[in-house]
Amino acid sequence: MTTKNTLVETRTVNIALTAEEHHNIVEAIGHENKRLLEQALGYLSTWNLNYPIVNIYLDGNTDMVAVYKRADLETGYVIGAVWHEDHYGFHS
């Protein structure tokens, strides 16, 4: 049976990074790469708009994990943003 994917009307994005954690990531990846961190957060925030909730948190010194949840709060998908010395790669 094929199910139709429906885009949600709204999404709750929880970015669970403290200011100190954000600062430490920038220090680790280099200030010249700060925009890459911001782009990674944007990508994780807007990936697959079929899930109404996404929780993004730090995993290690520079990597992040995004957990996408259904309206019933069941986990639907998980993606990691992994720092590769000069860019973020996204892995599920």
Image (cartoon, helix red, strand yellow):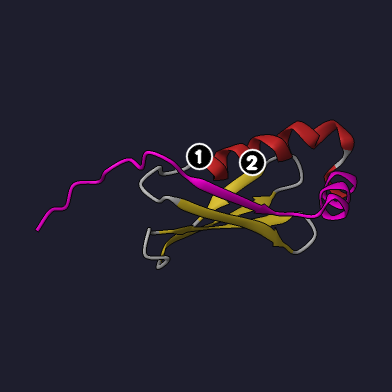
Counting from the top left corner in percent of width and height, residue 56 is at: 62, 55
Q: Amino acid at mark 2?
A: Ala
Question: Quick one: quadrant of the N terminus?
Answer: bottom left
Q: Amino acid at mark 1?
A: Thr
Q: Residues within 10 Å of mark 1 (few under 14, many from 20)?
A: few
The residue at which mark 2 appears reads as: 40
Query: Which mark, by number, is residue 54?
Result: none
Element type at mark 1: helix
Element type at mark 2: helix
For marks 1 and 2, give the CA distance. 10 Å
Residue at the bottom extreme, as displayed: 74
Residue shown at 88%/47% (left/top)? 23
Residue shown at 56%/48% (left/top)? 13
Picture layout, residue 14 above or below residue 36: below
Which residues fall within the magenta stretch? 1-27
The residue at which mark 1 appears reads as: 46
Counting from the top left corner in percent of width and height, residue 7 is at: 32, 40
Magenta stretch holds residue 73: no
